[in-house]
Amino acid sequence: MHGSILTLLGGVLLALTSCSSNAHDRDIDERSAEATVGGSKTLSFPFDGGVGSVPQGWSVGTSNRREGSDDAVWERRRDATAPSSPNAMVLTDARNHVGQAFNLCWNSAISMADIDVEVAVRVDGGEEDQGGGPAWRIGGENDYYAARWNPLEDNFRVYSIKAGERLQLDTARVRADTETWHTIRVRHVGDSITCWFDGEELLHATDAKLTQPGGIGLWTKADATTRFDNLSIAGAASDL
């Protein structure tokens, strides 16, 4: 549903974006599409605004970072395989991260509680962990929700992370090709969470640990290096 809305409105969204120039738009950066339909607004981030570093308005952090280690390296890179080629957002280096170190890259210019978020994911590598997914209601590097596909364990899971402590809310078995892109979608309204993998509804959870609006971003665990593209967010127009 979410993807089809973006497809139908593609031309309108791009036209609206080219006309947008206020300060809030500049803070968000990398937005290629925007529209308001029936009180709901949709934003899309293909990460095609440039190469190297993260877009304006985005932050990088690490939950439970080991003393002496740095944040993982995130940057936009050329990627002809990306769904919205030529670029993807890539976690390129997390060599010093192990165990419960969670890598986070997020846009704090957006603050939302109820959301419908979708992102394309492709595995690059990782010995301890692989894969990743979206994060939302981000209050900082230690407080947020995240959904993750992990091909090393053939699973798809949704978590709450509060004060750096991760709690698994639901899990499903998923076996998927690591050489191709896959889509993760999450809908979180109130305390109800539903997650899809490649269009299949697999996870359901109820959780009220984090109720405040927060940022939207990307997440991996430990040494997982991962590519992301086509991050899109739908929510109340007043929140975006």
Image: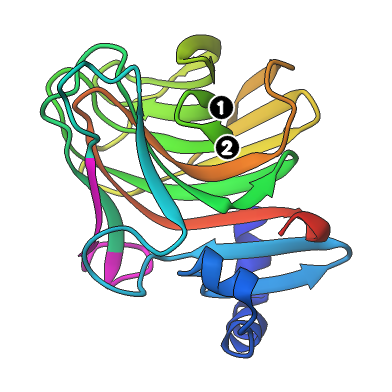
156, 99: nearer the viewer: 99
**Residue 202, placed above or below residue 15:** above
What scheme was used to colour the molecule?
A: rainbow
Q: Which residue bears the numbered disc 2?
A: 136
**Residue 180, placed above or below residue 205:** below
In the displayed orientation, state which residue is furthest to the right. 38
Q: Amino acid at mark 2?
A: Trp
Instruction: Please say whether residue 1 is visible from this viewpoint.
Output: no
Judged from the image, the secondary structure of the residue bearing numbered disc 1 is strand
**Few, some or many C-alpha atoms within 10 Å of disc 1 (few <14, some 14-19, many ≥20)?**
many
Q: Per the image, is 77 magenta? A: yes
Residue stretch rendered in magenta on the structure? 73-87
In the displayed orientation, state which residue is furthest to the front. 68
Residue 21 on image: x %, y %? 61, 84
Q: Quadrant of residue 35?
A: bottom right
Residue 152 on image: x %, y %? 24, 20
Judged from the image, the secondary structure of the residue bearing numbered disc 2 is strand
Q: Residue at x 35, y 72 (%)?
A: 48
Alpha carbons under labels 1 and 2: distance apart: 5 Å
Q: Amino acid at mark 1?
A: Tyr
Q: Quadrant of the C terminus?
A: bottom right
N-terminal label among 1 and 2? 2
Left or right of 193 on screen, residue 103: left
**Few, some or many C-alpha atoms within 10 Å of disc 2 (few <14, some 14-19, many ≥20)?**
many
Q: Per the image, is 219 magenta? A: no
State if disc 2 and disc 1 touch (CB < 8 Å): yes
Q: Which residue bears the numbered disc 1?
A: 145
